[in-house]
Amino acid sequence: MIAAHHDQVTSSEPRRGLRAVWAAVGVSTLGDGAFAAALPLAAAAITRDPTAVAAVSAAAIVPWVVIQPVAGALMDRWPYRSVMIVADVARAAIVAAVTVLVATGTAGIAVLAVVGCAMVAGQIFHDTAVQGVVPSLAGRGGAQLDRANGRIYGAETAGKQLLGPPVGSATFAVANWLPFAADGASFVVSAILLWRLPRVPAPNASPGRLWRSVVEGTVWLARHPQLRTLALLASAGNIAYHISWATFVLLATDKSGLRLSPAAFGLMFAAYALGGVVGGPLTARVNAVLRPQRALLCLAVVHALAWPLIAAITSVWVAVPALAMVGAAQTMTTTTNVGLRQMLVPPELLNRVIAAFRWAVNAPTPIAALAGGVLASAFGLRAPLAVAGIVLLIAALASAPTLLKRPLATE
C-alpha cells in the first residue's frame, strides 16, 4: 500500500517537475510502443484466429472497466510521485517476466492477455497521476497548461506510436523477446527520472469513504452537460478505434489486405503517430479559431471518415495518410479533453472526475474489440473498419446540438 502522506511543492520547482514528467513519459512510452507492436505480433504468431487475437486486445482493456472507477478516488489518498514510480517499477517486473516466457516459447494467448491486462492497470494509475500533477505545476488554465499538456501528450504519441512500434516490430523479427525487454528497461529509466518530481499536495486532505468518493465524481460529471457529452463522444471514438485495431494486424499482414511483413507492420503505428505528432502542437491554435467544442466535432468527423477509406483500398500509400488522419484526430481530441477537464473541474474533484470520464470512455472498448473480431470472422477483415466509421459519425451527429448550442459551463 502506498503511504498516504501529502507531497509539497515550492514555487521554484514547477518547471523542473514538468520537465521530469515530460522526460519520464517520453521514455516509458517509447518502450510501450515497442510492446504495443510486439504483443499483437506475438499473438498472431501463436494463432491466426481473429477472435483469439482480438481477445488479447480486449483483455488489455478490462482494467478500464474494473480499476478505473476507483483509481481517481484512490489518487485523493496517495501522493502523485509515489504512484507513478510504483506503477513504473511494477510494470518493469511484469514485462521482465513475460520476456522470459516469450524467449522460452511458453507464452500462450492466455499469458499475453493477462500481461496486457496487468500493464494497462499500471498505466491507469500512472496516467491519472500525470493528469492530476500537471495543473498543480502549470496552473489550471491558459497557454501554459496547453503547452504542458501538448508537450506531454506529444511525447506520448511520439514514443508509443511513432518511434516505439517500428523498433518493436523490427526487433521482434530479430528476436521475439527483444521488444518486451526494451519496455522493461524503459520503465526503470522512467522511475529514475521521476525522483526529480517535486512533492505535490494531495487535492483532498479528507477524502472520506472510497465508494462515496467514486459516486461524487461520477455524479458531478453526469450533471455537467458539455463534459458528459464529450465523454460520450470520446467513448465513440475509442469504440471505433478498437473495433478497427483489434484485428488490424491481420488485415495489414494478409495477402488480400495490405500485404505487410511483420517488420513493416510498425510503419502503421508510425503513420498513426506522425499525425499525432504534427497535430498535437496545432491543438491550441485550432481551439482558438474554432473553439474547443467545434474542434472536437470536426476531429470526430475526420476520424469517422478515415477507417472506411482504409477499408476500401489495398494500397499502403493510401492507408498511411488515412492512419495519420486518425492519429491527428485522436491526439488533438485527447489533448483538448484533458485541458477542458483540468480547467472546468474543481481541484478537489479532479481525480475523481478524470476517473469517471476515462471509465465512460474506455468501459465499452473490450466489447468493441471482441466485436471487431466477430465482424472480421463473419464478414471479412475489412468489415470492422467500415462499421467503426459509421459508429463515430452517428455519435458526432448526436453530440452536435449540445456542443454547438451551449457555452462552456464553469460550474
Image (cartoon, grey):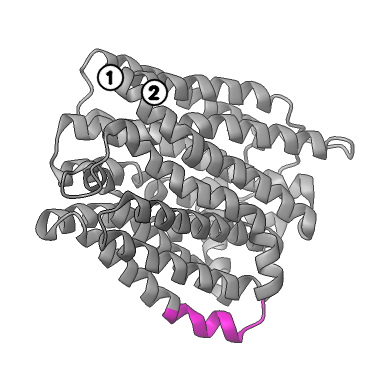
Residue 377 point in image, percent of width and height: 12, 53
Residue occupying the point 23% across, 23% down:
107
Q: What stretch is highlighted in magenta?
A: 397-408
Q: In the drawing, what numbered circle is on residue 125?
A: none
Is 321 contained in the magenta span?
A: no
User: How many numbered circles does the render carry?
Assistant: 2
Q: Main secondary structure of the magenta part?
A: helix
CB atoms at circles 1 and 2 under 8 Å apart?
A: yes
Residue bearing mark 1: 102
Residue furthest left in the image: 378
Residue 158 visible at all: yes
Left or right of 157 on screen, residue 261:
left
Alpha carbon distance from label 1 to label 2:
9 Å
Amino acid type, mark 1: Val
Residue occupying the point 78% across, 58% down:
143
Q: Circle 1 — which element?
A: helix
Residue 2 visible at all: no
Task: Answer above or below: position of 185 versus 213.
Answer: above
